Amino acid sequence: MKKKLFKYILPAAMVAGFLCFFFYDAIHYITNIDDSFNDEYVGKLGIVDAGKLFFSNINGRWFSHIITAIGFAFLKHNYTYYAIYVTAMMLLFVTSVSVLYRTYFHVFVRQEVSVKHSFAFAFVFTAALYFLLFVGRQEIWAWVSSANNHLLSVILCVFLFCLLLQENDSLLKTIAVVMLAAAIGGLNEVNSVCCVLAIMGLFLLQWYYYPQLHISKANMLLAVVVIGVSLSINVFSGGYESRMNGLPNFTLTQSIKNTVHTFALPLMQYRHLVLRLFALLCFLFFIGTNFSALKFSQKDIRVVAGLLVIIGVSFFLHCFILSDIVPARGEVWGYMLGLFILAIKAGRNPIG
């Protein structure tokens, strides 16, 4: 009974709580200026002209604006449609985590995980992430324009890594890698940079530690190049220049302080500290963590240290660009990667 409580009942309760909060926020939509602006201009100008306006005058991010323009052309300021849209985005995130979980165990552990168990993991994983970033839940999950950029960039990064980790090689896979990489470069700039760093880390990981894996180095290098080209379209756009000119001057010292502040903020927000600890413990119970039996080789330490550096960079770059602490929508990539590291290093076996 005790095992069922910690392994199944508490994680299930956490997922239920996550879904209750998520759907409450989705149904009780809070109007924000970004969604109102995008909705109005797409209605007035149409998809193509609105996308051009957003790209040239707002903030670049060409792929985000294509998705946003198409999305609001159908949403038409209907809050019920908004709720359906963000629900679809949430389920896409869950699906991406599920696929990554199955891919990881298939490639690195040589174990097959059923679709049922991978989705169980993905829902518990998403619920834990939701409560860890609880303060910013609406700007991550219920803010349509934000989801079309920040959350979508994380989702596409996960799917890209699922493709890169697969050992089979085909023309269709290469085409999919190019398309995902191009889309990632047209979304959140910091996530794009950190995705490139993570791909380079995967390249080195396969080169030094897993030479037996038949992972395509050509696809990894191609993804880096395509993300770089796509990202340059953002950075050299009029919209990006306009956004950067509207930000305050930033300094290295202040950016480092803001990075430390961002990492410390979850502990400083006392009202939600218990909720975060509960979510983290539920996740640890669910993956079957046995800290007394944990052993880390030098290889494990190097790999984890490298991934933690990439997470740190993702926070620092946000602070450096914004001249402020990282907003919750900018933390998703780092928290997601950190939680996945915890799952694969502290978990005993595939769920089930």
Image: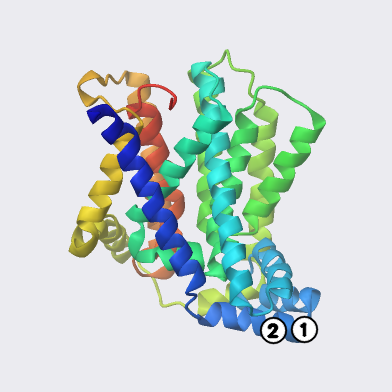
Q: Which mark is residue 331?
A: none
Quadrant of residue 248 within the rendered picture: bottom left
Query: Where is the C terminus found, in terms of image quarters?
Result: top left
Percent x, y of residue 271: 20, 64
Say which of 94 and 140 sits in front. Answer: 94
Horizontal side, residue 27 vs residue 7: left or right: right
Q: Residue at x 30, y 47 (%)?
A: 279
Query: Where is the N terminus found, in terms of image quarters?
Result: top left
**Residue 97 vertical position relative to residue 231 in the rendered view, above or below:** above
Whether residue 317 appears in this view of the structure is: no
Graded by Cα atoms within 10 Å as few (under 14), some (14 to 19) or many (20 or more), the crowding at tag 2 reads some
**Disc 1 to disc 2, how far (Cα)?**
6 Å
The structure's colour scheme is: rainbow
Percent x, y of residue 286: 34, 34
Q: Secondary structure at mark 1?
A: helix
Q: Which mark is residue 41?
A: 2
Find disc 1 in the rendering and name its residue. 45
Q: Secondary structure at mark 2?
A: helix
The answer to whether the residues at label 1 and label 2 have Cβ atoms under 8 Å apart is yes
Say which of 319 and 184 sits in front. Answer: 184
Q: Residue at x 36, y 57 (%)?
A: 133
